[in-house]
Amino acid sequence: MASHKFLLLSLVLLSFNHLFCYSKLDEDSTLGYLDDISSYDMTAYPSYYAVHGERGTIAYQPNRFVLERVARVAGFGYSQKVVNVEDHGAKGDGTTDDTEAFEMAWKEACSSSTSAVLMVPENKNYLLKPITFSGPCKSDVSVMIKGTIEASSDRSDWNGKNGRHWILFSGIQNLYVGGRGNVNGNGKIWWQNSCKINKSLPCKDAPTALTFYSCDKLTVENLNIKDSQQIHVSFERSTNVDVSSLTITAPESSPNTDGIHVTETKNIQITNCVIGTGDDCISIESGSQNLKATNIVCGPGHGISIGSLGDHGSEAQVSDVIVDTAQLKGTTNGARIKTWQGGRGYAKNIVFQNFVMHDVKNPIIIDQNYCDSKTQCKQQTSAVEVSNVMYKNFKGTSASEVAIKFDCSTNVPCHGIILQDIDLAGGDGDATTSLCNHVNWTKKGNVIPLPCAK
Ligand SMILES: *[C@@H]1O[C@H](CO)[C@@H](O)[C@H](O)[C@H]1NC(C)=O
Ligand SMILES: *[C@@H]1O[C@H](CO)[C@@H](O)[C@H](O)[C@H]1NC(C)=O
């Protein structure tokens, strides 16, 4: 009972802390951001600022569910049911397969008539094969990972299963996942068998460590996630998502190990994350709308990317994205938008601001000739339209001479591109340059390097 009370207290504190962060963010940075915007010359800015009035709709609306969660935990805490995976036989010794115990514990938590906590105790190492936690649940569920969850290193455990997932949360409302514990994808064996590492092997998918599919009102916070088989954390077809304080690490050489991947997801906020992997720190793919990422530390890796969009002639839609306050160190890209030739749709209303770069190869890049394929991509006429993109307050060093690169589509030029207060020198203070193909840009303040002549 004492430990139950302690748990309750920690949950309440955790949630209030969370609320505090929220209001702080809301009042300080979001409003600060808006004040900043309203002092701008609107006519010089992407049309959506003007269209929606000076308060702008791009501002992130804090999700009501955070308040609801606090109320829920504070008010109904005593009736919360704690389901410990060890009550269902999990060993946590690092060698026993604990998959079945976790499945049974989930079943109990998800069917509880009062809100439930699925507890993964600390100082233990639970080995899991691919596993799915499905909703809908009868009440709200929190998954508290205090110890370590580690993936099976036997690839045959994925035989006959969906090879794209290790841990999948699907169709759940009001889910909370946190606990300050560790998630280890144990991905080495998958990396060795990747066609990117061993060119003689066929290209196959590897699992994503944590996938959240079709979830609404989701909070994921305070976790260390490492060495995923492929993508570390993926948000798919979800709404109202709050992600914070994740540390994500994998070797720089590990293939396709994106940190946070977002696709077909609306209203998502990502804050205070430290990410260093072998691919994009954050990749924002088609169907992402109203995304705000703040306080991101990235590197090594491929930077913060929108895309790739429009592969195989597909239609992509990405809009209302703000990436505010990012530090990138030793990455191949800084703020990147990448699209394949032959696609359709758009990437628009995008703000990258307050970026500090250390030794980044392509600090600012739009690449509409992206081709991540074994065979050469052929010339095509259609393209995903890139418009209303603002880069504001960028400082630091470029590891290559070309610090600003806009390589846009011949037929669908980039437009509404704004560069403001940019200072990107070479590593030893060397001069840097810009490259512009088919781009309509505007400059405000000082921009170094100077954008190409029009
Ligand atoms: C690459 O894969 C081939 C085919 O499975 C294998 O024979 C070879 O040893 C692998 N190379 C390395 C460096 O692992
Ligand atoms: C650039 O944008 C302005 C304003 O939208 C437009 O008038 C002009 O025609 C555009 N120029 C090119 C080369 O697209």
Image: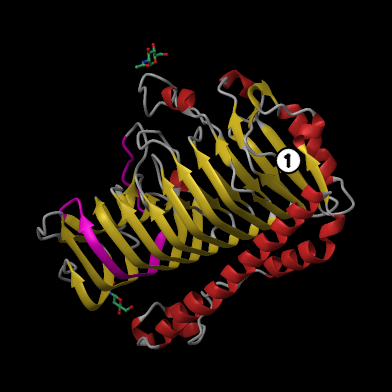
Q: Quadrant of residue 251?
A: top left
Q: Secondary structure at mark 1?
A: strand
Q: Which residues are magenta?
A: 376-401
Q: Residue at x 54, y 34 (%)?
A: 184
Residue furthest out toward the right? 113
Q: Is residue 202 left or right of residue 161?
A: left
Give the residue number, with chain letter if any, for mark 1: 133
Q: Is residue 202 left or right of residue 180?
A: left
Q: Residue at x 79, y 64 (%)?
A: 72
Q: Residue at x 82, y 39 (%)?
A: 107
Q: Tell me, yes or no, if residue 383 can be seen here.
A: no
The image position of residue 37, as x and y in percent, is 41, 82
Which quadrant of the figure shows ligand 2? bottom left
**Quick one: quadrant of the C terminus?**
bottom left
Q: Is residue 309 left or right of residue 445?
A: right
The image position of residue 95, as x and y in percent, is 63, 20
Q: Tell me, yes or no, if residue 17 can be seen here.
A: yes
Looking at the rendered structure, the kind of residue marked 1 is Phe
Q: Quadrant of residue 304?
A: bottom left
The image position of residue 302, as x and y in percent, is 35, 46
Q: Residue at x 49, y 78 (%)?
A: 28
316 or 105: nearer the eye? 105
Q: Is residue 248 left or right of residue 336?
A: right
163 or 20: nearer the eye? 20
Is residue 267 inside the magenta stretch? no
Alpha-carbon neighbours of circle 1 within 10 Å: few (<14), some, or many (≥20)?
some
145 or 226: nearer the eye? 145
- Vertically, is 353 above or below 52? above
